[in-house]
Amino acid sequence: MTRHLTSLGFVVLALVLVAVPLFSDNEYELRLFMLFLIYGIIAVGLNVLVGLTGLISLGQAGLFALGAYTGGILATRLGFDIVTASLGAAIVSGLFGVALAYPSVRVRGVYLAVVTIAFGIIVENVAIEWQSLTGGTTGLTSIPMPNLFGAELSGYAFYGVLAASLFLATLLTHNLKVSRYGRAMLAVSQSETAARALGINATMMRTLAFVVASVTAGVAGSFYSFLNSYISPDIFTFADSVRFLLMVILGGAGSTFGAVIGAYILTYLPEYLQQFQLWQKFAYGALLLLVMFALPRGIVGTVVGVAKRLRPAPRAVLAGDGIPAEQSLGSTSHRTSELVARDLTVRFGGLTALSKASLRVKPGEVHALIGPNGAGKSTFVNTISGFYQPAEGICELDGVQLTGKRSHEIARIGLARTFQNTELFGEMTVLENVMVGHQQRLGYGIAQALLRTPAFRREEEVSRRTAIGLLAFVGLEDYANEEARFLPFGLQRRLEIARALASKPSLLLLDEPAAGLTTQEIDDLEAMIRRIAGLGVSVLLIEHHVELIMAVADTVTVLDYGQIIASDTPSVVQEDPRVIEAYFGTPHTANALEVTA
Ligand SMILES: Nc1ncnc2c1ncn2[C@@H]1O[C@H](COP(=O)(O)OP(=O)(O)OP(=O)(O)O)[C@@H](O)[C@H]1O
């Protein structure tokens, strides 16, 4: 249904864009609408950054200025036509977008916003000071009428270029949003840790979002220089950056048409409020405040939210539509599914959290790693999955070296994990969560996603069906279209397992999966772990729940003070005097593990 509504939205947008010039009375009206088209292009690009990756840029006016100057200079000095000049503007702003994305590796939130503000200020100052190129405070004058292939574009033809560009920008950013790239960006914004553990390169996704927002701002800037035929530094102020951001938020960050609606309102509102003269700015601010207070998720976000509440989508999917887990995970059987850690040592300052820890998870076995609190289990897990780097030692999965690799690279090699405190993508649906898990197995590239090629559609369908099959495997098919954050805790744990399995791992690492579960849920978990191992996926289980360990583990390894003190079958380990001493501090006659239960 959402897909039909989106298609309808595009038809309405196309009709409006075609109808406006037919019904506009004068040149001023048409020009104002063309200004909205330009702002709309900036806003839909910025929507990818703000709405999908959750990052905030207050430097869009700087990128807009960069595009305007590049386009203007290429047209006046080198006689470029509108397409090549705008292409040049896109490249220059895109490169600056990559540079602007770099700080986001280290800083986020308000700090990143400050970095982008600083960028805007720098661009403004360069535009003023580099007189020979930009004309300084006087600016660039006599930018020629836009022309294409030597022919001058009339007002209506130029309108056509702008309208087609806004339509295309909206369509392409929508296609990006509903592809694996859009899902990955949303995943990074909701839990970067989980996204990385599923093979997503978070830095790459943020950079991609910055590039989209920069290229669109650059192209819009170039169009602006042709529309205005004059540009100067005072046209691109910090207030404009704020206005561009407001367009996205007011319309509804993350929604396909929200940014277009926001751009329309914030282009026309100041014009409309001019009649209030002295009160114009006050009325502008007050209105914005009122709308944002009443509609905190923006206009489209709120409308969609109400519509979903009135006519909720069916929560369940048909398990029969899915690819059975046995089939989708079966293709991993060619792997050996063996993990070998040798002499892993991890230090935190003066504290040695892991000391020469060695462990081997044999193909297809369930291997439990236990130990008293603070023994180093989490450190071990975080080290083999790439979140910590060991000072010494190596780790291999299926003969491939993991040590020195980053977490998303390790996930791609075949190690999937869950977290002690569940790390779901709360605002995505249950099905989407699992599809994010499957995304590293998809082969389509960004061009295919933007153009929705047949290969893209085929792979997306396989991804959806694989996810449905895995939801059926963990018994969650009835919740497929529910937002993950609304699931009861026990089901969230199951979803995390389905999501990890979607990456088709050789080794599944379960970090305290029984914590917080009821007895019945632990029984179900036990059966699930057996079924997973039965599919040829090795399992490394970090757990305190002794009955579960005794029931499912083939091998138990015990850590104490960062050292492995025992590794054998459960029945042998529970009789081991060193294990008994580790748990009780003194040699104990009783069975160590049973007493701790
Ligand atoms: N990031 C860190 N910085 C400094 N010290 C740490 C860090 N992570 C763990 N430690 C220390 O390393 C030791 C091992 O901790 P770790 O969390 O790995 O134990 P654990 O066996 O997982 O414990 P629990 O069962 O309580 O989760 C502890 O002394 C802990 O305080």
Image: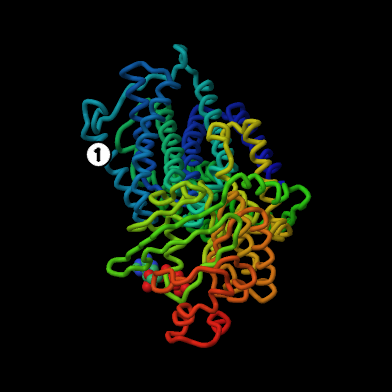
Q: Secondary structure at mark 1?
A: helix
Q: Relative to 230, is 328 on the left or the right?
A: right
Q: Which quadrant, please, contains the C terminus?
A: bottom right
List x then y, in percent, for residue 367.
Answer: 56, 64
Q: Nearer the viewer, residue 511 or 35?
A: 511
Check the image and report above or below for 296 versus 514: above
- Residue with the most extreme top position: 150
All told, the count of numbered labels is 1
User: Mark 1 vs ligand 1: CB under 8 Å?
Assistant: no
Check the image and report above or below for 112 versus 359: above
Q: Nearer the viewer, residue 284 or 371?
A: 371
> Measuring 66% from the left and 68% from the top, which residue is drawn there?
526
Q: Amino acid at mark 1?
A: Asn
Query: Which residue is identified by label 1?
Result: 125
List x then y, in percent, for residue 318.
Answer: 77, 52
Q: How is the image coloured?
A: rainbow
> Measuring 58% from the left and 57% from the top, which residue is drawn there?
538
> Measuring 34% from the left and 55% from the top, which residue is drawn there?
111
List x then y, in percent, for residue 419.
Answer: 52, 63
Q: Relative to 434, is 59 on the left or the right?
A: left
Q: Quadrant of ligand 1?
A: bottom left
Q: Can you see residue 322?
A: yes
List x then y, in percent, for residue 364.
Answer: 61, 56
Q: Nearer the viewer, residue 219 or 536?
A: 536
Q: Can you see residue 275?
A: no
Q: Nearer the viewer, residue 448 or 77?
A: 448
- Disc 1 crowd, CA 10 A, few/some/many (<14, 14-19, 20+): some
